[in-house]
Amino acid sequence: MMDRKLTLSLDAQVIDSAKQYAQAHNISLSRMIESYLSAVVKHEQEVPEAYSPTVNRLLGVITLSEDFDFEKNYTNYLRDKYK
């Protein structure tokens, strides 16, 4: 793919905060925005219409590793909660 320039007008405070975040995470602001926009487009293409708007907004908020064992973690949570 070939990169192209894009000019955006954003709130100055948002830009400053985004630059600090990008620097702290060792990523360029351009790549950070590209990654976000790619995720939004991909998410929109994958979201089934059957979900409510609230559920659609929450989809993809949490990313778990592929080896995450929900049942094991939930069992441990309940065990600790009811000790």
Image (cartoon, rainbow, N blue to C red):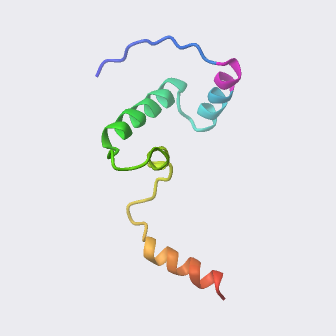
38 w.r.t. 60: above or below? above
Q: Position of residue 5 (x, y in %)?
A: 43, 12
Give the magenta range: 11-16
Q: Position of residue 37 (x, y in %)?
A: 43, 30
Q: Position of residue 7 (x, y in %)?
A: 50, 11
Instruction: Report the label total.
Output: 0
* Quadrant in which the N terminus appears: top left
Whether 1 is among the magenta residues is no
* Left or right: 45 as drawn, with respect to 78: left
**What residue appears at the point 63 percent right and 37 percent down from the top-left corner?**
24
Quadrant position of residue 69: bottom left
Q: Position of residue 72 (x, y in %)?
A: 46, 78
Residue at the bottom extreme, as displayed: 83
**What residue appears at the point 50 percent right and 74 percent down from the top-left corner?**
73
Along the viewing direction, whichever of 50 and 29 lies nearer the viewer: 50
* Quadrant in which the C terminus appears: bottom right
51 w.r.t. 31: above or below? below
* Left or right: 47 as drawn, with respect to 33: left
Residue at the left extreme, as displayed: 1
* Left or right: 18 as drawn, with respect to 68: right
Residue at the right extreme, as displayed: 13
**What residue appears at the point 46 percent right and 53 percent down from the top-left corner?**
63
Along the viewing direction, whichever of 64 and 55 lies nearer the viewer: 55
